[in-house]
Amino acid sequence: MKNLINKIKNLFSDDIGIDLGTTNTLVYVKGRGIVINEPSMVAVNNKTGQVVAVGKDAKEMLGRTPGHVRAVQPLIDGVISDFEVTEEMLSYLINKAQNGFKLLGPRVVVGIPSGITGVQTRAVRDAAMNAGARTVHIVEEPMAAAIGIGLPVHEPTGSMVIDIGGGTTDIGVISLSGIVNSRNIKIAGDRLNSDIITYIRNEFKILIGEKSAEDAKIATGSVLESDEGLESVVRGRDLITGLPREILVTDKDIREAIHHSITQLVDMTKEVLETTPPEIVSDVLQSGIYLAGGGALIRGLSVMLSDMLGGIKIVVAEDPLTAVVRGTGIMLDDIESYKESLKEHENQLSPTTK
């Protein structure tokens, strides 16, 4: 009877999975796949309080807005910093994802960083409900990534995932549908961008923006020396003359810039392994550690991690950027089977239907 009711509800609403990231938010719709991959950015008019743009359009305004318009990242380090703006962003994304008019709000699974507080989890749930969701389920990102990668999360076998996002890196050890051990650290894509900005300012006396730093990281970033000789042009403001200037940045420059942060990431991974039960560590030694998230694409990272962790096999997930949102999509297909993997599992009516 319950399955029949759910089938009827699905005729009138969509099932949506959301990877709510600091840098990018991805949206999966059941039956259609990933339909949205946009920056977690909102442009707000300070005079009127109105939202001017969301996603890609808002990011294009970053650093280029007049005084009365500000481009806001409503999530900082994976946590909601501006509830109202997050709600506006989710409402925009949910409405854009839905295929035409639906009588009922969608059932939503949202991926969040591991280790965030109950209050922060509640803020995510409330924002999604206020944005129009009928039901909201919360899953921690390492679990969602493991499901998206296809790891045996239900079995009594240990799996380890490192999800390197924009604001945070989640390191999770998973067995029997739960997270056995995890760490959430603020060393991820945004921190590496900040490292690059600081390095270029100190070494070249040039001030560059976050977008330029990210472009340089993607084009030139590598944690190991190579024969490729990667180079990219970076433009910014000369701190001495105040005039525009461009320089050539090499992979060696980026490597030196991010070295300290990468070392901290390796140390934290070691700490997780050291505090994980031996039987599960034995499983991880056999299956390897899986990398997900945008940071998994940093050149040489998998090789460096393997070397620093005593030769453990490091596997970069297929399409690591979408691992979490694919996991939410798999969960939507059979939410009951993944009940134990959810951070909270409760059905709620949206505020408009109470």
Image (tube, helix red, strand yellow):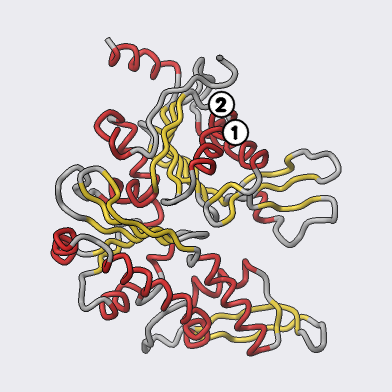
At 32% from the left and 62% from the top, the residue drawn is 291
Q: Nearer the viewer, residue 281 or 62?
A: 281
Q: Which residue is mark 1?
A: 91
Image location (x, y in percent) of residue 110: 44, 39
Image location (x, y in percent) of residue 285: 16, 66
Amino acid at dot 2: Gly
Secondary element at image label 1: helix
Q: Is residue 121 rendered to the left or right of residue 309?
A: right
At 56% from the left and 85% from the top, the residue drawn is 249
At 14% from the left and 47% from the top, the residue drawn is 156
Q: Which residue is mark 2?
A: 132
CA distance separating discs 2 and 1:
7 Å
Image location (x, y in percent) of residue 89: 61, 40
Q: Alpha-carbon neighbours of circle 2 within 10 Å: few (<14), some, or many (≥20)?
A: many
Amino acid at dot 1: Ser
Image location (x, y in percent) of residue 165: 46, 59
* Residue that lies at the very extreme toward the top in this rendered image: 1
Q: Quadrant of the C terminus?
A: top right
